[in-house]
Amino acid sequence: MVTSLLLAGCSTISSIQSAQVSASSTAAVAANIPVCEATTAGAVEEKLGQQVELFFYEHNNEFSWGSYGCYVSSFIGQKGEVDGFQVKYQQKKALDEVDVPALYDAHTYAEAAALERATRFTLDGVTGEGVTIPLETGNWAAVWRYPDTTILTVLIKRKSDVEKIANGGSIAKSITELFAPHVPQVAAGPTQELTFYPQNEDTARVLGIHDGGATPLKPWPSPSP
């Protein structure tokens, strides 16, 4: 079994980002490749304006709530302000908890929505409500609350040479728009142990995985030209 990298916290994410410079990947993830069972690499690229270098994810329904974690890294060396983003969801009924790195002054959705710097938004075709929030770290967050009070969070991480993402709120909302319609159903489905793409030695080395990772529940399609 692969040790969880996503649901344990953000420190592992930081170490992964530091290690990315040693990866020797030369091609972006093909547009038709499904990302974290919620969207496609092409859709992510359209929202970010940057190609996807790698992603990894897991979800678990073995407890009384479903959990889901996905991390997507943009391609190293290309123009753009975003280093990557993380999506997390935990189906804790009526617990309205918000857990976002560096969001120190809000621990529930109500507190997040009440922040002066928060901007409210809605999504076409998705019931619920959300807010985008700039963080002290120069990153951005989006918090989405479903009608059953479960919470999906998105963390948009800036590149190290970028002081602050200029349109971070818009990006955070756009990524929420891709994931919010699908994540609860994915989290409630069969458990997926940590898996990653591209499935090669470079990606495994960046993630610190030595056993090849878990097999995806649905086989990867052949990359489109």
Image (cartoon, rainbow, N blue to C red):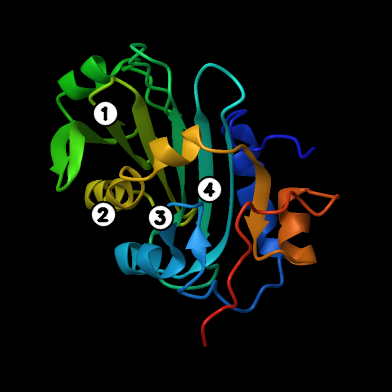
Among the two numbered marks 2 and 1 on one chain, the one whose residue lies closer to the N terminus:
1
Residue drawn at (57%, 78%) of the image = 223
Q: Which mark is residue 113?
A: none
Per the image, label 3 sits on a secondary structure element best described as: loop
Q: Is residue 80 visible?
A: no
* Nearer mark to the viewer, of 1 and 4: 1
Q: Give the percent coordinates (x, y) of residue 122.
A: 14, 40
| Amino acid under disc 2 | Ala
Disc 2 target residue:
166
* Nearer mark to the viewer, of 4 and 2: 4
Disc 1 target residue:
146
Alpha carbons under labels 3 and 2: distance apart: 9 Å
* Nearer mark to the viewer, of 3 and 1: 1
| Amino acid under disc 1 | Tyr
Alpha carbons under labels 3 and 1: distance apart: 32 Å
Among the two numbered marks 1 and 4 on one chain, the one whose residue lies closer to the N terminus:
4
Among the two numbered marks 4 and 3 on one chain, the one whose residue lies closer to the N terminus:
4
Label 2 packing within 10 angstroms: few (<14), some (14-19), many (20+): few
| Amino acid under disc 3 | Val
Alpha carbons under labels 4 and 2: distance apart: 21 Å
Residue drawn at (37%, 21%) of the image = 98
Q: Is residue 54 left or right of residue 114?
A: right
Alpha carbons under labels 1 and 4: distance apart: 21 Å
Disc 4 target residue:
71
Per the image, label 2 sits on a secondary structure element best described as: loop
Residue drawn at (22%, 51%) of the image = 170
* Nearer mark to the viewer, of 2 and 1: 1
Per the image, label 4 sits on a secondary structure element best described as: strand
Q: Give the percent coordinates (x, y) of residue 180.
A: 32, 42
Disc 3 target residue:
162
